[in-house]
Amino acid sequence: MFAPCSGWGFGRLRLSQLRVGSGRAAGSWACRAGSAREYGSGGGQRQPGSEPTVSRPGLARQALKEWALLVSPFGRLRARLPCHLAVRPLDPLTYPDGDRVLVAVRSAEGGARGLAGLQVKYDEALKEVTIVSDTIDPQASVEVNAPLKFDLNIKSSGSGCVKVQNIECDNCKIETEQGTGILQSVKSQKLHVQTKGGKVICLGTVYGNINIHASDKSTVTIDKLQGSTVNISTEDGLLEAKYLYTESSFLSSAAGDITLGSVHGNITLHSNMGNITVDSSSGCLKASTHLGAIDVYVSQLGKVELKSHEGSILVKVASSLQARLELSGKEVDVNSEVHVQEMAEAHKDDGVIITGLMNQASKHEKWIKADAPKGTINFRSQSWFQSLKLQD
């Protein structure tokens, strides 16, 4: 599942080490890490606030300290850490009531600095589990098994990375500095992710109303987002998504490229200096860039507006599409395979404007507008099969 990302690393830990097994889950940061100790309902049950146990030394990514907190359902986890943090759901067979939060601190080197300053506690009135430390070794990792439905408020500092997997939330807020944030199959009514220099990676399907903000050269890489509203912004990093199924999306980048696969819904894209590529658009699409180029395939038409102030535009359409066309650029090239009726050509301000109706469309049909005042517009037909880019 993580093979495509195997070239990226978490400091001294590589993404290729991140394995998620079935049954008793493997460790979140390294495939050989053990799971947190399971506490039964018998006499060995640990009460909230009790002292952690210390595991035997000498094991790979051994558990140095462990906690088992008795919690109420639908609570919240609040974490402030400078090290790696992984959150995943409890095993429903072992904990059918979903009333525990298990916390384990692990290290691959047989020990970790600053464990004495790590605070792990549960506030019953607030229904909040708190995990806080300023002094824990940045190379350590904290693993949390929480109830399936649990809100998250996580902030990592330095190079600390955060991974959240298979959790459902009303509110999920994750902030990193230089570390990577990974969300895998997360559902949240409100999902906010922010990084000041790390990566944001969404694996599987992430559901909800989503806000992702990546500063500096941070990149955002997404498998599939599904929800009502999505807002994603980068500064100088790539913004890449394979699938977007949303009612409304706004994606922007100051200097990075925006590369999208299949998008559905009302999509607005803007990049000041980067290129914009959409493999397949089904719905309303508005894309603009100042210096970059635009490359778009329109499979099912809503309303399409494309503008590159200084670059060129390539528009590919399904051959059966019915649309009103308005193409304006320094040069405009409409492929002869495209069936355009009532085509008209006009010249204005050292440019050319082509208008017409594609496939007997009425003048009140949905339309495609493209404007490249200093570049070339190429307009041609393309099949859905060609849009799959199987040659890559």
Image (cartoon, rainbow, N blue to C red):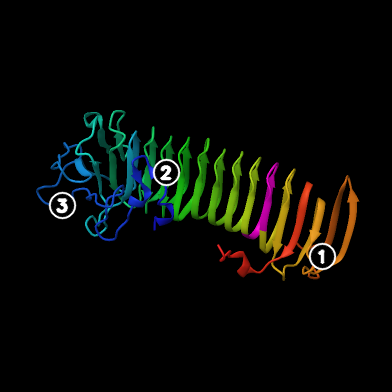
Q: Secondary structure at mark 1?
A: strand
Query: Callout 2: few (<14), some (14-19), or many (20+) C-alpha neighbours within 10 Å?
Result: many
Query: Horizontal and vertical percent for residue 156?
Result: 38, 35
Which residue type does callout 3 highlight? Gly
Q: Secondary structure at mark 2?
A: strand
Mark closest to the chain's N terminus, 1 or 3: 3
Question: Badge 2 is on which residue?
Answer: 181
Residue positioned 31% across, 28% down in the render: 134
Does residue 300 lie above or below 209 as drawn? below
Q: Nearer the viewer, mark 3 or mark 2?
A: 2
Proximity of marks 1 and 3: CB atoms separated by less than 8 Å: no
Question: Badge 3 is on which residue?
Answer: 40
Residue 90, numbered label:
none
Mark closest to the chain's N terminus, 2 or 1: 2
Does residue 177 lie above or below 8 as drawn? above
Q: Magenta stretch: give its range.
A: 280-296
Query: Horizontal and vertical percent for residue 80?
Result: 35, 34
Query: Callout 1: few (<14), some (14-19), or many (20+) C-alpha neighbours within 10 Å?
Result: many
Question: Badge 1 is on which residue?
Answer: 357
Q: Nearer the viewer, mark 1 or mark 3?
A: 1
Query: Horizontal and vertical percent for residue 262?
Result: 58, 60
> Is residue 285 highlighted in magenta?
yes
Q: Is residue 78 visible?
A: yes
Does residue 353 lie above or below 196 as drawn? below
Q: Secondary structure at mark 3?
A: loop
Which residue type does callout 1 highlight? Leu
